[in-house]
Image (spheres, rainbow, N blue to C red):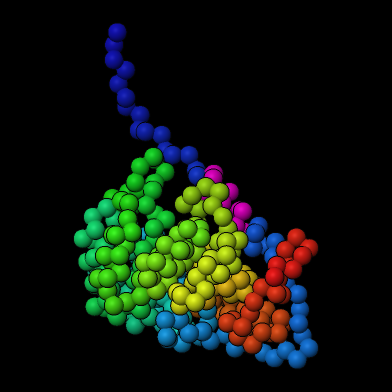
Amino acid sequence: MALIKKTQPAPKQAPDRSMMITGDITRAYLDSILVEERLIGAELADIRTVIFGREYSSPVMMPAFSHLPSYAEGRYTGLVEYSIAAKELNILNWIGMSDNETYGTIALTGADTVRIIKPYADHTKILDRIAFAEAHDAVAVGMDIDHTFGRNGGYDVVIGEQMGPQSKDDLKEYIASTKLPFIIKGVLSLRDAAACAELGVGGIVVSHHHGSMPYALPPLMILPEIVKELEGTGIEIFADCGMDTGSDVFKAVALGAKAVSVGRAMLPALQEGGTEGVKAKITQMNNELIRMLSFTGFRTPGEADATVLWKDGKPMA
Ligand SMILES: Cc1cc2nc3c(=O)[nH]c(=O)nc-3n(C[C@H](O)[C@H](O)[C@H](O)COP(=O)(O)O)c2cc1C
């Protein structure tokens, strides 16, 4: 029997429907939270926020992004443009997967930056990137532990780089290697939150990384429980996923987040307007956050709490 030659390229993986469902669930959860008004005696709110001892103009932060497509025929990388916006607006900048050369370019913008490092199988890469970030004045370093596993039944491979599991001892080694606060990005359970406290991390991001696991909990659903779990530890608690408006940010801070990152919702503004587009988007979110805080009688994001939030016809707290 003649052998059938395989000349066809392997079929492309089908779109990740479960990832889209996770996004929809997260959006629906955010939109299911309603807000009461408390106007008598209310004054205009002030949204300045202190993170890791530094004051920023708002609790809205840049996302830990990487491998963005090139913008404006390669004149922009995207990462540099939003980092400049962070510097000019005085908000905290975040950068995701990056080699040291790229990180050096970001550091040159002068933005206060958190560097999130991938869970590389080769741990020397992690230690090297932590040391480089510290030498280039990063505010904090961390790891997106939710990018360990891929969709192909194995550890993920990201732009040709092999990811691998990270034990508690591995994380301890990274934390001990730097004077900077270490952030675990991708905490979505009380179990991991408690482990973070035990490890002595400086911060966590309550996040599902825009759906790296199907049917992941919306971050704001578990956030209040995590806040309770970490009470008194001094760990900074951040959140992301689906943040698009000042109202989303308001709900996150009212449920206990210190600050939030705006990810994909910022992309159209970045693509169309570069630095100025990002600045306009963040300013719009800041203004809406001021309005939400003022309407609910809170003077600062830190004062906001869940007593003004309603869900399914009942107060949330
Ligand atoms: C193009 C792109 C690149 C990303 N790269 C990284 C990364 O390198 N490191 C990381 O921790 N998260 C990365 N993320 C995840 C975001 O930081 C964020 O957790 C996620 O997009 C959820 O927020 P959003 O719903 O506001 O987009 C990336 C997301 C996108 C869309």
Please state, as top left, top right, bottom left or bottom right, where the N terminus lies in the image. top left
Nearest the viewer among 214 and 182 is 182
In this picture, is 160 found above or below 278?
above
Q: Which residue lies furthest to the top in this view?
A: 1
* Residue 91 included in the magenta stretch of the image: no
211 displayed left or right of 125: right
Residue closest to the eye, 272 or 117: 117
* Image-based side of 183 in relation to 298, left or right: left
Rendered-image quadrant of the C terminus = bottom right
Residue 203 falls in image quadrant:
bottom left
- Count up the numbered dots: 0
Q: Main secondary structure of the magenta part?
A: helix
**Can residue 229 be spotted in the picture?**
yes
Q: Where is residue 268 in the image (x, y as percent from the top left)?
A: 52, 65
Q: Does the magenta stretch include residue 22?
A: yes
> In this orientation, does residue 207 appear?
no
Write the residue at 50% across / 70% down.
Answer: 230
Apparent side of residue 41 relative to residue 85 in the rendered image (left or right):
right
**Residue located at (22% from left, 66% from top):** 128
What segment carries the magenta color? Answer: 17-27
Q: Say which residue appears at 59% left-offset and 67% top-offset.
A: 224
Quadrant in the picture for residue 64: bottom left
- In the image, residue 229 lies at what x, y percent? 52, 67
| Picture residue at 32% right of the left edge, 27% below the top | 7
* Residue 262 position within the rendered picture, expressed as x and y whole percent measured from the top left: 51, 69
Residue 189 lies, in percent from the top left, at: 51, 58
Q: Taking 160 as reference, is 265 above or below it?
A: below
